[in-house]
Every structure is written in structure tokens, then in C-alpha cells.
Image (cartoon, rainbow, N blue to C red):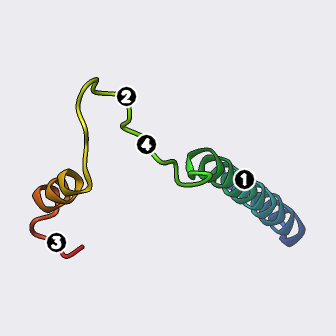
């Protein structure tokens, strides 16, 4: 047996569903912002190699050679 649904009941159901969808969209946006803030670097950190290899001097030529090796197929 099928029950008749009035226009007011249908409108109320549609509004409730829309309100729920809007609330979910807001929650998803807040979650996105939280994740972005957590994983976005706050500034470029410079990694210093001084002292990591005792007795070894790393020169600019060594760094240039390493860049060429790593990025040989790209233009830097």
C-alpha cells in the first residue's frame, strides 16, 4: 500500500536533506583546511650538512656535481 505524501511533507524532507548536505560540505571544508595547515611547510628549512660526515669537506663543486647527477634530464 502506497501512502500519499503531501507537498509540505516533501518540502520539509527536501529541506532537511539539503541542510544535512550543507553541514557535511562545511565539515569537509574544515577538514581540508586542517589537513592543509598540518602538511603545508611553514617555511623552507635549510638542511645543513656540516658535521654529518666527520673529516669530509663538501664543496660547491660537489653540490653542482650532485645536482647534475640527480637532475641530468631536467634543466635547472
The residue wearing badge 3 is 74
Seen at 25% across and 26% down, the residue is 55
The residue wearing badge 4 is 47
- Asked if the residue under mark 1 is in contact with the one under mark 4, i.e. CB atoms within 8 Å, the reply is no
Q: Earlier in the sequence, mark 1 or mark 2?
A: 1
Query: Which of label 2 and label 4 is nearer to you?
Result: 2
Q: Earlier in the sequence, mark 4 or mark 3?
A: 4
- Element type at marker 2? loop
Q: Give neighbour class at mark 4: few <14, some 14-19, many 20+ (Cα, 10 Å).
A: few
Q: Which mark is residue 30?
A: 1
Seen at 56% across and 51% down, the residue is 41
The residue wearing badge 2 is 51
Query: Which of label 4 and label 3 is nearer to you?
Result: 4
Q: Relative to 70, say whether 7 is above or below.
A: below
Query: Which of label 3 and label 1 is nearer to you?
Result: 3
Q: Give neighbour class at mark 3: few <14, some 14-19, many 20+ (Cα, 10 Å).
A: few
How far is the residue under mark 3 from the one under mark 1?
38 Å
Query: Which of label 1 and label 2 is nearer to you?
Result: 2
Amino acid at each position: 500500500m502506497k501512502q500519499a505524501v503531501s507537498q509540505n511533507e516533501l518540502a520539509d524532507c527536501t529541506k532537511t536533506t539539503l541542510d544535512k548536505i550543507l553541514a557535511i560540505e562545511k565539515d569537509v571544508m574544515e577538514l581540508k583546511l586542517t589537513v592543509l595547515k598540518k602538511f603545508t611547510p611553514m617555511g623552507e628549512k635549510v638542511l645543513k650538512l656540516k658535521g654529518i660526515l666527520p673529516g669530509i669537506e663538501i664543496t660547491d663543486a660537489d653540490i653542482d656535481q650532485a645536482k647534475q647527477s640527480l637532475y641530468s634530464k631536467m634543466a635547472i
